[in-house]
C-alpha cells in the first residue's frame, strides 16, 4: 500500500517497539492497522472508505481493532510461502497465457472488479483457456520489492476441474523471472484455497486477521 502511493496514513505515532498507524486505500477498499494506533484513527480510516473496506489486523493488535469496530468479527487468515518441496504442475502453452488487456474479457459478463482493475493497471494476469474462453485467472494483487500476493478467480462452472493450479504455476514462474516470491493468503475457513496452496507446495509462515465489511 505504501509503495503504491495511493494510500493515506492516519494516527501516525512513534513509541514502543516501532511505528503505529492506520493505512487506508479507497481504491482497493482496504485498511491495514500497524502497531497500536488509537481506536479513533481506526474508525476514521474505515469511515473515510465508506465502511466498505476490509480491515487487516495483526496478532498483536487484533483485540484492539475488534474493540474499535463493533459488529465486525475477525477471521484468521494464514499467509504462505513456497516451501523447498514446491509441486508446481505443468502449464501447457496451448492452455495458459498472459492476458493482453481488458479486451480479453469482453465476452465475459460480470467479471470481478479486482480483475478488471488489475488489467487496467497493466498488472500481469494469467488465464487458463477452454476452447479459447478464459475460465480461470491468477493475477498479482499486490507486490513489494521482493514479494507478490497471489489472487485466483475461476468461473463457477469450471471450479474443481484443475484449471487454477496450472494458471497459478504459470504466473509464479513468470514472476520468479523478475526475482519475486509468491505469497499465498487465505482465511482459514476457505478450505479449497488452503488445499490448493498445500497441493502446490506452499507452507504457512504467518497469520493475520481480516475484518470483512459489516
Image (cartoon, rainbow, N blue to C red):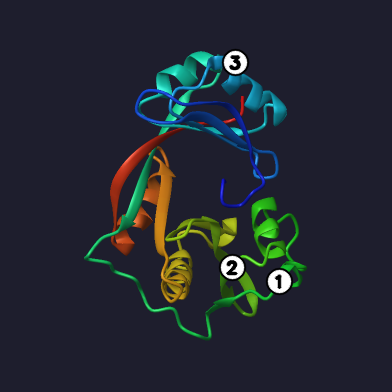
Asked if residue 162 is positioned above or below residue 11 in the image, the reply reads below
Contact, mark 1 vs mark 2 (Cβ under 8 Å): no
Image quadrant holding the C terminus, namely top right
Q: Nearer the viewer, residue 156 or 170?
A: 170
Q: Nearer the viewer, residue 100 or 19?
A: 19
Q: Which mark is residue 101?
A: 1
Cα–Cα gap, marks 1 and 2? 9 Å
Can you give x and y, in whole percent of width and height, for residue 98 in the image? 58, 76
The residue shown at (53%, 17%) is 38
The residue shown at (38%, 45%) is 191
Q: Nearer the viewer, residue 160 or 134?
A: 134
**Alpha-carbon neighbours of circle 1 within 10 Å: few (<14), some, or many (≥20)?**
some
Query: Closer to the camera: disc 2 or disc 3?
Result: 3
Q: Which mark is residue 125?
A: 2
Q: Secondary structure at mark 1?
A: loop
Q: Decide which of tag 3 and tag 1 comes sooner along the chain.
A: 3
Q: Which mark is residue 40?
A: 3
User: What is the residue that sits farthest to the front in this orientation?
Assistant: 14
**Alpha-carbon neighbours of circle 2 within 10 Å: few (<14), some, or many (≥20)?**
many
The residue shown at (62%, 71%) is 134
Q: Decide which of tag 2 and tag 3 comes sooner along the chain.
A: 3
Can you give x and y, in whole percent of width and height, for residue 164 in the image? 47, 64
Contact, mark 2 vs mark 3 (Cβ under 8 Å): no
Q: Quadrant of residue 142?
A: bottom right
Amino acid at each position: 500500500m505504501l509503495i503504491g502511493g495511493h494510500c493515506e496514513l492516519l494516527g501516525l505515532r512513534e513509541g514502543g517497539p516501532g511505528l503505529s498507524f492506520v493505512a487506508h486505500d479507497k481504491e482497493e477498499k482496504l485498511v491495514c492497522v500497524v502497531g497500536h494506533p488509537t481506536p479513533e484513527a481506526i474508525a476514521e480510516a474505515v469511515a473515510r472508505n465508506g465502511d466498505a473496506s476490509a480491515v487487516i489486523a495483526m496478532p498483536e493488535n487484533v483485540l484492539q481493532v475488534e474493540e474499535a469496530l463493533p459488529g465486525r468479527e475477525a477471521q484468521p487468515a494464514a499467509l504462505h510461502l513456497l516451501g523447498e518441496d514446491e509441486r508446481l504442475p505443468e502449464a501447457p502453452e496451448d492452455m495458459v497465457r498472459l492476458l493482453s488487456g481488458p479486451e480479453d474479457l469482453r465476452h465475459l459478463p460480470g467479471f470481478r472488479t479486482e480483475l478488471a482493475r488489475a488489467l487496467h493497471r497493466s498488472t500481469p494476469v494469467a488465464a487458463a483457456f477452454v476452447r479459447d474462453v478464459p475460465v480461470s485467472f491468477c493475477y498479482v494483487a499486490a507486490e513489494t520489492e521482493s514479494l507478490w500476493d497471489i489472487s485466483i478467480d475461476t468461473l463457477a462452472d469450471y471450479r474443481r476441474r484443475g484449471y487454477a493450479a496450472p494458471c497459478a504455476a504459470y504466473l509464479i514462474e513468470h514472476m520468479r523471472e523478475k526475482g519475486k516470491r509468491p505469497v499465498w493468503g487465505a482465511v482459514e475457513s476457505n478450505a479449497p484455497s488452503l488445499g490448493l496452496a498445500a497441493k502446490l507446495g506452499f507452507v504457512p509462515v504467518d497469520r493475520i486477521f481480516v475484518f470483512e465489511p459489516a
